[in-house]
Image (cartoon, rainbow, N blue to C red):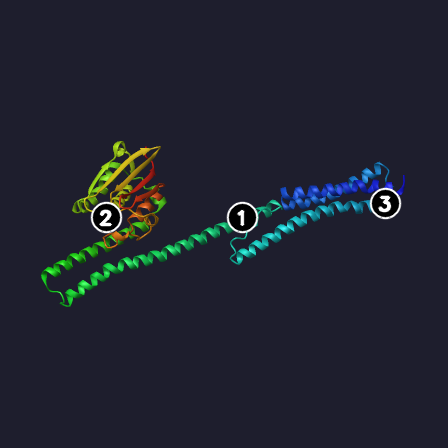
Amino acid sequence: MSESVRLLAILGPITLATGATALLARRIVARTPLAVTMIAIAVLASLVTAVDLVVLNHFMLIDPNDRAQVGLVAAYSLTAGVAAALVAGSSTTRAATRLAGVAARLGQNDLDARAGELHASPELRQVGEALDRAAERIGVLIETERRTESARRDLMTSISHDLRTPLANLRAMVEAIDEGVVDDPRVVSRYAEEMLRSIATLVSMVDDLFELSQVDGAALRADVRSISVADAVEHALELCRHDAAARGIRVDAELGAADAVRCSAKLARVVHSLVDNAVRYTPPGGSVSVTARAVDGALELTVRDSGVGLAPDQLRLAFQPFWRGESSRSSRGSGLGLTLAQRIVEALGGEIHASSVPAEGSAFRVVVPGGD
C-alpha cells in the first residue's frame, strides 16, 4: 500500500467522524440543556478517539507499537471534539450576544427590539422568548398608559368646560341678587328657577362621574342581581316620561316574548341613558321606541328615535365622554350618558352599536349575553 493511500485510509474515517460529530453537536445544542451539551461533547470526543484507534488498528492501518502514529491519530481525532465545541460555542455565543444586544436596546427604550428565533440551547431560547414577551407587555403597558393619560387630560378638559358654564351662571345670578342689582320678585323667581336648573345639571354630572368611576367589569359580572327585561325597561321609561310628556314625545316599548327574560339590574341604567338621550335629541311631537328580543343565547335591546339624527363623523364621537351634538349643547345632561351605557354593556360582556340618518333619527342596539 502506497503512503498516500495509507494516509487517506487513516484520515478518511477521522474526517468523517469529525464531520458527523460537528453535525451531531449542532443538533444537540438546539435540543438539550447547555450542561448536557457540554457533557455530550466531551463524551463524543473521547468515543471518537477510541473508535478511531480501534478501527484503524483493526484494519492494520497503524502500528499500535508506534507511539508517534498512535499519538498523531489521537491528536487528530480530538479535532472532532474541538469541532463540536466550536459549533456549540459559536451558537451559544451568537445567541448570548443577541440577547445582550436586545436587553441593551430595551434599556434604551427601544421597545421594538426582539430576540426572535434563536438556534441555541433551550435555556437561551427560553430567555429570548421571555425577553420578547416582556418587551411586548411593556410596550402594551406604555401604550395603555399613554392612552389613559390622554383620556385623563381630555376628561379634565371636558369637565372643566362643562362645569364652567353652570357655575358661571350660578355666580352671576347669586351676585346680582346679593348686590341688589335684581330685586324684582318675578326676576328673582326666574333666577331661582335658572339656578335650580344649573344645580340639577351639576348634580347630574357628579352622579354620572361617580357611577362611571364605579364601573368595573369583574364587579359587574360578580353582581348576580337580576331583573326581568320588562322591569328594567319600565324603570328606565318611568324616569324619562315627565320630560317626554312635557315635550309631547311619545315613548313606548314592544318587548314581545323577551319581557320575562332575566337580565342584569345594571341594564336598567343602560336603557335609561339611551332613552334619556333619545328624548333630548327628539323634537317635540316625535317618538321614541324600545324593542327587545332574545336570540341565540343573547338579549338584544334597541332604542330608536325620530330625532335630528347624527352625521357619520358625529356618530363616531357619540360615546366619547362629554360629547354632545350641537343641537343639545345648551340642554341639560352631563354628556356622560352614552359613555356610561357603553362601559356597562362592555363590562357585562356585550356590545353596543349606533346607527343614524340625519333628520330621520337614530338607533342604539345593545346585545348582552344571557338572553335565554
Give coordinates of residue 190: x percent, y percent: 14, 58
Mark 3 or 2, nearer chain start: 3
Residue kind at label 2, given as amino acid type: Arg
User: Which residue matches tag 2?
Assistant: 280
- Front-lying residue, 336 or 314: 314
Q: Is residue 90 above or below residue 156?
A: above
User: Residue at the spot x=50%, y=50% of the render?
Assistant: 136
What residue type is disc 3 on? Gln
- Whether the residues at callouts 3 and 2 have beta carbons within 8 Å, the answer is no
**Which is closer to the viewer, label 3 or label 2?**
2
- Lower sequence index among marks 3 and 1: 3
- Residue in view at x 56 percent, y 55 percent: 103
In the picture provided, is 44 more to the left or to the right than 232? right
Q: Label 2, label 1: how many angstroms apart (C-alpha)? A: 53 Å
Q: Residues within 10 Å of mark 3 (few under 14, many from 20)?
A: some
Where residue 2 appears, as percent x and y from the top left, is: 90, 41
> CA gap, disc 3 to disc 2?
103 Å
Which numbered disc covers residue 130? 1
Give the spatial CA distance, label 3 vs label 1: 51 Å
The disc label shown at residue 307, or none: none
Q: Which residue is mark 3?
A: 69
Please, is residue 372 above or below residue 79 in the view? Answer: above
Residue at position x 75%, y 43% from top? 18
